[in-house]
Amino acid sequence: MNGLYESGEDYLETILILKKRNGNVRSIDIAREMDLSKPSVSRAVGILKNKGFITVDDDGAIHFTDEGSKTAKRIYERHRVLTEALMLLGVDEKTASEDACRIEHDISEKSFSKIKKCVRDSKKES
């Protein structure tokens, strides 16, 4: 895997979402989005930085490294696809998204690719 715990993957996914939404991301934005304390976010940002997933510039803006970007995109794709799959089964969007967040960290690549193909095929049929 990538040497990250589930919480680290959640941080990377949140940074990606905030970058898409706002363009620029700082620790305070992450704290607000995830409803966490600033010290908790500062600690997590330090860990992500030390593991080579992000950099932080002098203004406090957070940027992905190549590895960080790749990992964040992989987790975000899993979240989106799993949410869609659960919704296809009739689960409401809020519950589907919450459940996808739990599943995305543990599902094997083999199972995920099958679910992804199934979701893609169901879109073709629509």
Image (cartoon, rainbow, N blue to C red):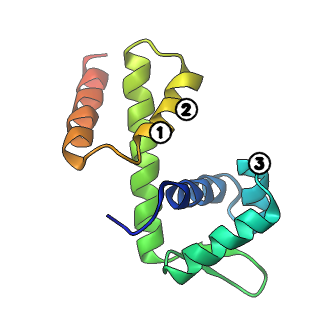
Name the spot of residue 117 as percent of width and height, x first: 22, 34
Q: Any mark on residue 76, and which?
A: none
Q: For mark 2, give the secondary structure.
A: helix
Q: Mark 2 points at which residue?
A: 98
Q: Residue at horizontal 46%, vertical 67%?
A: 69
Q: Residue at horizontal 49%, vertical 79%?
A: 51
Q: Which of 119 and 86 is in front in this view?
A: 86
Name the spot of residue 118 as percent of width and height, x first: 23, 28
Q: Quadrant of residue 104?
A: top left
Q: Residue at horizontal 58%, vertical 79%?
A: 49
Q: For mark 3, give the secondary structure.
A: loop
Q: Can residue 111 be seen in this view?
A: yes
Q: In which quarter of the image is residue 84?
A: top left
Kind of residue at disc 2: Glu
Q: Check contact, mark 3 vs mark 2: CB within 8 A.
A: no
Compare marks 1 and 3 and give the one earlier in the sequence: 3
Q: Mark 3 points at which residue?
A: 35
Q: Residue at horizontal 59%, vertical 59%?
A: 11
Kind of residue at disc 3: Asp
Q: Check contact, mark 2 vs mark 1: CB within 8 A.
A: yes
Q: Please state if 27 lies on the left or on the right of 77 as rendered.
A: right
Compare marks 3 and 2 and give the one earlier in the sequence: 3
Q: Any mark on residue 102, and which?
A: 1
